Image (cartoon, helix red, strand yellow):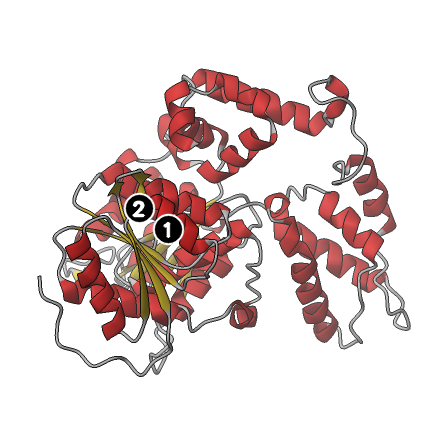
Amino acid sequence: MKPPEKQPSTGPKFTALILDDDAVCAALVADLVRAEGGDAVVCGSLAQARAAISTKTFDLFTLDYQLPDGRGNTFYYELRDAGQLAPAIMLTAYPHVPVAVELTRDGLFDYLTKPFEPEALSTRFRQAVQSLKYPEAEWGTLSFVARSAPMKAVQNLIRQAAANPAATVLLTGETGTGKDLVARTIHERTFEQASPKPPFVCMSCPTLPSEMFEAELFGAEKGSYTGAYQQRPGLAEAAEGGTLFLDEISEMPMVLQAKLLQLLESRVYRRIGSTVSRLFNGRIIAASNRVLPKEVEQGRFRSDLWYRLDVFSISLPPLRERTEDLPEIAGTLLAQLASKYQRQPVTLKPKDLAILQSYDFPGNIRELRNLVERSLLQTPLEESWLQIDPVWLAQARARARPQPGAPLPTPGSDESLSPLEAQEQAMIKQALQKEGGMIRRAASELGLSHQALLRRLKKWPELRQYANSASAEEES
C-alpha cells in the first residue's frame, strides 16, 4: 500500500501516537498522519506507548489489536482510565466483531481492518481532527456539560454519530438524563454546515393514543379512517432530509414496531390508505429509559427491532455518576432561569452545593432543574444566594451519601454502607450470580452501563468474588 500524494493540510496541527509492531504498516500510517498536517510518534509495544503517554499528550491514537506484550483494546481502556480521551482508531488484521462493537460503544472513534485503504484512513483522520475543533465550552450553547469522564465518553460518541449521518442511533438512560438534548446535539453537529438547516422532528411515544401512532408517524390519506377529513402528512415525511427522534420508543405498540423495522431496513413507508411508497431520506434516533433487553424478554418489545436499533448506542450516565458536572449544570440552570424570570442571577452556597452533590437525584437533571426553579422562585429578589427549598433540604440531608474524607466504620461491616449502598450491593451480587459471573451480562440485567458496573466493582472489591474469573481477568 502506497500513501497518496498529498500536500500537508493547512488546518490545525495535531500529534498522533501510532501503536503498531508492524514497521511497514506503522510507517504508512505515520506518512498519512503527516500528509494531514500532523506529527507522528510510533511505538512498537505497549511498554513504549505507556512511556510515551507519560510524558506527552496526544490528540489522536491509532492502535493495533495484537501486540508483542498485550492487546490494543486493553491499552484503549488504560487511556480512558488515565483521562486520555482523544479520538482513537483501532487497526487490526484480526477482526473480532464483538470486540469492535464493545469498543465502539465505549467511545472508540473507529475500527478498521488490515489491509485498509489509505484514503479511508485519511478520511478518518480528517474527521477526528475536525472533532478537535470543538472545545467543550462550545457545547454550552446547548447546555451540554461534559467535564466528567463518563460524559466525555458520551461526547466522543456524539462526535462519531455526527460524522456518520446514515447511522441509526439508540440513546439509553434513566429518565431525566438528557436524551432529548443529546439527540438535538447530534442533529446540530451533523448538519452544522447545512443551510438551511434540515428539520429535527420529535415523536413522543408515551403521549400518543395507540390508535393514532401509525397516522402520526406515517401520515394518512383523506377518508382512510373515521375522522380523516383531509390528507395528513406524517412525522416521517416532516423529518425528510433531517432527523426523526422517537422518544421513549419502548412505548410504541407492537404492531407499529414491525412497520418501524421495515422503515429502518428498507427506508420505505406508506401513508394509511395509500398505495404509493415513499422513501425516507433522513436519520432516525430512538431513545428509551427502559432496559430494552428486559422488554424483549418480557414480550413487550420486538427482538429484531432491538437488534436493528442497537448498532450505534449511547448510554447516558445518571447524575449521581457524574457529580463533578453538577456545579456547572446547576450554574447553567440558574443563569437560564434567572433570565426567564427577569431577575439578577443568584449563586449556590458551597454548603448547599455539597448537599446537592451528596444526593442521588433519582429524577436526574430534570429533578435538579425542578428544584433549582422552585428554590429560585422562593428566593427574595434582593438575595444574591439561592435559598434552597427548606423541605427538600431537610429530606436530602437525611438521605445524603457519606462524603469523601468523612470518617467511616471498618470496611466490610454493615455500618460502612448506607442503606441505599447496601441495597445496591445486594442487587449487584444477585445479578452476578444470576448471569454466572459475567460482568457485561450483569450490567445489562441491572440496567447499568458496562463501565458503571466496573466502577462499582472497583469501589467494592468484595463483590469481585461473584464475578466469573475469566470475565474478571478480561476486564482487568
Q: Which mark is residue 45?
A: 2
Q: Dot 2, how many residues are within 10 Å of its Cα: few (below 14), some (14-19), or many (20+)?
A: some
> Eyeballing the image, is 47 above or below 221?
above
Q: Residue at x 41, y 19 (%)?
A: 469
Foreground pick, 363 / 110: 110
Foreground pick, 13 / 99: 13
Quick check: marks 2 and 1 in contact, CB under 8 Å?
A: yes
Q: Is residue 400 left or right of residue 242?
A: right
Q: Amino acid at mark 1?
A: Ala
- Quadrant of the rendering where the C terminus is positioned: top left
What is the x, y in percent for residue 54?
48, 53
Kind of element beneath mark 2: loop
What is the x, y in percent for residue 110?
29, 54
> Eyeballing the image, is 260 above or below 155?
above
What is the x, y in percent for residue 327?
70, 58
Q: Is residue 319 left or right of residue 154?
A: right
Q: Residue at x 49, y 57 (%)?
A: 180
Kind of element beneath mark 1: helix
List the residue tagged with mark 1: 49
